[in-house]
Image: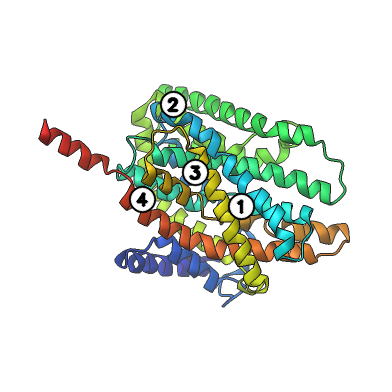
Amino acid sequence: MALSLAGIIILSLFINFLFERIKVPALIGMLLLGVILGPYVLNLLSPDILTISSDLRNIALIVILLRAGFELNKDTLNRVGKSVILLSFIPAIFEGVAITLLGPHFLPLNYLESAILGAILSAVSPAVVVPLMIGFIEKKKGTKKGIPSLVLAASSIDDVFVIVIYSVLIGIYLGHQVNIAWEIASIPISIVIGIALGLAIGWILYKLFEKYNLRATKRLLIILAISIILVRLELYTKDMVPFASLLSIMAIGFIILEKREKFAHELSSKLSKLWIFAEILLFVLVGSQVNINVAIDAGLPAVALIALALIARSIGSYISLFGSNLNFKEKLFVVISYIPKATVQAAIGGAPLIAMKLAGISTAPGEMILAVAVLSIILTAPIGAFAIMFSGNRFLTDDNKAAIEKIKSA
């Protein structure tokens, strides 16, 4: 495993350098590296690292979500609050409904199977989106209107909504007793409890850090450990007290920023250094989950379905921004930012297939769902990442430059 890690690090740093020189987002190169090194192409990664791939990806995701929390301030969220709520479910509904209605006409799936596919595909990828948004925040691009923060917050809630809908649909498909009313109610409940729990933990940690003068590195280790525990705790309590652990993690960073900005900046600085390694793990290991052969089996009808679903999603994203203070180009940037798929699709794309095997029913629909999920990652993660970088650099206002020009003209 150590040799695999060494190889991943060296090759990823080289690809980072190469892609930055040609002005292409480095995460695209790391995703492609993961595909090539993974078990479905060259199979050069150690089985041990693939066994713990899910845990490593979760830790990397925690790192970037904590960074996101330390970049979210109350004033910005107040400005974009309504749009955050709408973006957290309307685009997913548009995309999910489109796939449900169109799926049987493009693929050998019935309407319920298409709905399950729609739930899996309609999640945006925080692994792709969050790092890019933090980059725009650091460069002060679109920050005056809170545009990167808007996408950060909404994309995290979007995943909570989609995963609950998936759980309901797969339960119905397998003939399980599903309390639909409770499952739907658990969406706002898990969001509220997740945020409240994160705020409470963040406040306790702030008080602890105020009382005991711990070094920033120790403070960070405590927060990371608690965040990992929260992710695991969500799995154990989801049937009794559902809560969105990823939102809890962001809320920890948010409350520390509000209470003690100095602590937040110190911790964010430490996380930015840790992210160099975590980013490599996240994108290479996500790429390693991609089975090119399965994606090829989905064929052109699946490509057409994904494209039409993205059009529906984009319409939903644009509608969600009605009444906001964003101009057309800024709205278009948000729409583009909601394109990439990777995290959820890699995590649960194969879950229906496993569930069908365990239930002893035909696995053909599960195989097709997995194929389309994999194909969606291959198509949308690199294209979406490039489109976000391209549109962000051209459509978002450079607030640093605008402030300097304002001073000069005064």
Mark 4 vs mark 3: give the one in front. 3
Mark 3 vs mark 2: give the one in front. 3
What's the distance in space between the residues labelled 1 and 4, CA to CA? Answer: 24 Å
Q: Is residue 256 above or below residue 34?
A: above
Query: Which of pointers 4 and 3 lies earlier in the amino acid sequence?
Result: 3
Q: Amino acid at mark 1?
A: Val
What's the distance in space between the residues labelled 4 and 2, CA to CA? Answer: 22 Å
**Which residue does the numbered mark 3 point to in the structure image?**
318
**Which residue does the numbered mark 1 point to in the structure image?**
344
Query: Which of pointers 1 and 4 lies earlier in the amino acid sequence?
Result: 1
**Which residue does the numbered mark 2 point to in the structure image?**
78
Mark 3 vs mark 1: give the one in front. 3
**Which residue does the numbered mark 4 point to in the structure image?**
392
Query: Which of pointers 3 and 1 lies earlier in the amino acid sequence?
Result: 3
Q: Position of residue 155 (x, y in %)?
A: 52, 43
Q: Is residue 362 left or right of residue 129?
A: right
Q: Amino acid at mark 2?
A: Asn
Q: Residues within 10 Å of mark 3 (few under 14, many from 20)?
A: some
Secondary structure, mark 4, is helix
What's the distance in space between the residues labelled 3 and 1, CA to CA? Answer: 23 Å
Tell me which residue sits at (67%, 34%) in the image. Answer: 187
Query: Which of pointers 3 and 2 lies earlier in the amino acid sequence?
Result: 2
Q: Is residue 293 left or right of residue 149?
A: right
